[in-house]
Amino acid sequence: MKIGILSAGGDCPGINATIRGVGKAAITYGMEVTGILDGFSGLLFNDYVRLDERSLSGILTLGGTILGTSREKPFKKKEGDIISDKPQLIKQNCEKLGLDCLVCIGGNGTQKTAAQLSEMGLNVIGIPKTIDNDVWGTDVTFGFDTAVNIATEAIDRLHSTANSHKRVMVIELMGHHAGWIALYAGLAGGGDVILIPEIPYNMDRVNEELMERSRKGKPYSIVVVGEGIKTGKKGEPAGAYIAGQIEKGTKLETRVNVPGYTQRGGSPSPRDRIIATRMGAYAASLLNKHIFGRMVAIHHNELTAVPLSEVGGKTRFVPNDFYLIKQAKKIGTCFG
Ligand code: F6P
């Protein structure tokens, strides 16, 4: 069998570990492995490299993706597109390359494209990746644990400076429209207030909580904010908006911190390396059994494969009754 692997969408720690997992297992099964460069763009412009034992060695701990990535969405028409039928061209190029299957490593957008290519008759396997942990159909994605570690360290470091200056520290964390990173890092870092997109907040309640802490003699407060929460104007940065509202409503000195892309850069955590390796090797075992049209998933720590048709285009949000929210509320964490 000849297989192609690509990574698409925003990068995250653990993609290389996944490429290595798929590639090494596929080679063991006797398959030939091609790395498609820069996501779906590589299939439009025939950009690819051969992956062998040698090129798959030494990449387990590397951040980013050795294959590069892009936000190319072949099923979405853009102004200025020079290629009239991108999906058809992708299909033709896969045939020209002699690919028996395409492995697509990516988030929700990529899984949707993978589902559409699968509907067109291509043999496709999806592997979920994103720091946001919001891919529908799996309990977990690799990249998330590393991002939570980085975000938690950032919060940890805010405590001492907030305490010295008696300030409110607002930290804006990534996650797109989902609040997984803010919730986990917020809990791990001891955030006093955690605002996530899934839970509508009341600014008066947030300010009252901060005033109450100040009245109790607590010298500082940490407010963790998911980037996707509602703000005053569409597109207004969440952290800056909340910090402004706090200063206005409480007169407490407030600073805002945005760790940004550091959350998805660098080496994957050991947990993410393990998830990525498991998912990669499992994807190769599906290919070996000629099972296509599925996304690799983890349910209750067991590997499984869910139909791509069920996954594409959906987002996995934090449920309002999520157990961590209930427990955090018990210890007095304010969710607005
Ligand atoms: O999906 C991962 C992510 O880092 C989100 O958390 C963030 O909203 C987005 O990507 C940023 O996208 P871009 O790489 O296009 O700036």
Image (tube, rainbow, N blue to C red):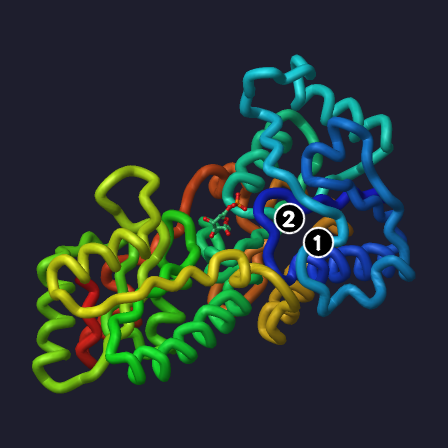
10 Å crowding of disc 2: few (<14), some (14-19), many (20+): many
Q: Is residue 243 above or below residue 218?
A: above
Q: As rendered, which of 150 and 308 lies closer to the eye?
A: 150
Q: As rendered, which of 280 and 336 lies closer to the eye?
A: 336
Q: Which residue is mark 2?
A: 105
10 Å crowding of disc 1: few (<14), some (14-19), many (20+): many
Task: Check if mark 1's residue and mark 2's residue have beta carbons within 8 Å.
Answer: yes
Q: Residue at x 59, y 31 (%)?
A: 73
Residue 251 is drawn in which quadrant? bottom left
Residue 278 is drawn in which quadrant? bottom right
| Secondary structure of residue under mark 2 | strand
Q: Is residue 188 above or below residue 335?
A: below
Q: Is residue 186 above or below residue 227?
A: below
Q: Quadrant of the N terminus?
A: top right
Q: As rendered, which of 95 and 238 lies closer to the eye?
A: 238
Q: As rendered, which of 184 and 205 lies closer to the eye?
A: 205
Q: Quadrant of the C terminus?
A: bottom left
Q: Is residue 48 left or right of residue 90?
A: right
Q: Residue at x 8, y 81 (%)?
A: 215
Disc 1 residue type (three-letter): Thr
Q: Is residue 206 left or right of residue 174?
A: left
| Secondary structure of residue under mark 1 | loop
Cα separation, mark 1 vs mark 2, equals 10 Å
Q: Which residue is mark 1?
A: 65
Q: Residue at x 60, y 45 (%)?
A: 294
Would residue 298 be seen by someone viewing this image from the given angle? no
Disc 2 residue type (three-letter): Ile
